[in-house]
Image: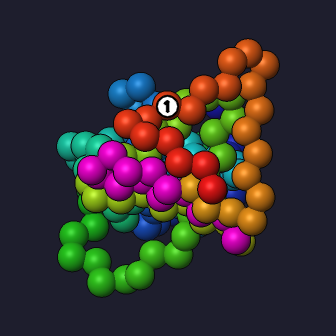
Amino acid sequence: MSEILNRIEGVIIGIFLGFDGDCPLVVFPGNPHETALPARSLAHLSSDMIGAEVALLFQNGDPEQPLIVGRILGSAQVLKPLEVTRDGEVMRIVARQRIELRCGKATIIMEKDGRITIRGSYLTSHASATNRIRGGSVNLN
């Protein structure tokens, strides 16, 4: 067995980001990658817990092998915004009320009632085939 450099000892608080298939994904301080890592879990997790703080241990101290030992309850700590990178794969984001994506002057807002709002200084739509706009009514300008 090769020696593990940069071992992580003790409990680390991370963030549960969702699932890749049935496998939970987490980010944490000291993550050796710029992307979320798959984790094993001792706790039951569901999609309504996405964004929750979780207590992590690491198998043999290896930062590549996180183990979720539980969810942090009643945390009053305000979480910093997370950067999530999942190149070449599907990343599902689920919320009960609203999802907002913001970058500078650009915003995409999705509401639970089905409304989607896209705002920006410039909007561009490209299609290699037909580009359709459909709705009960369509207002341009």
Instruction: Choose between 27 and 102: the one closer to the eye.
Output: 102
Quadrant position of the N terminus in the picture: top right
Give x and y (percent) for residue 48: 26, 50
On the image, numbered disc 1 is attached to which residue?
Answer: 134
Classify mark 1: residues with Cα within 10 Å, few (<14), some (14-19) or many (20+): few
Q: Is residue 64 left or right of residue 19?
A: right
Disc 1 residue type (three-letter): Arg
Residue 126 included in the magenta stretch of the image: no
Residue 39 lies in what quarter of the image? top left
Q: Tell me if residue 30 comes above or below residue 88 in the rendering.
A: below
Give x and y (percent) for residue 120: 68, 63
Instruction: Choose between 63 and 139: the one closer to the eye.
Output: 139
Residue visible at 70% across and 49% down? 33
Quadrant position of the C terminus in the picture: bottom right
Please report the bounds of the magenta region as a residue range.
105-117
Residue 108 included in the magenta stretch of the image: yes
Q: Residue furthest top?
A: 129
Residue 131 lies in what quarter of the image? top right
Residue visible at 25% across and 43% down? 46
Instruction: Choose between 28 and 132: the one closer to the eye.
Output: 132
Give x and y (percent) for residue 9: 51, 62
Residue 86 in sight here: yes
Residue visible at 52% across and 37% down? 91
Q: Tell me if residue 23 comes above or below residue 11 in the rendering.
A: above
Residue visible at 71% across and 71% down? 104
Give x and y (percent) for residue 116: 45, 51
The kind of secondary structure element at disc 1 is: loop
**Main SS, magenta residues:** strand
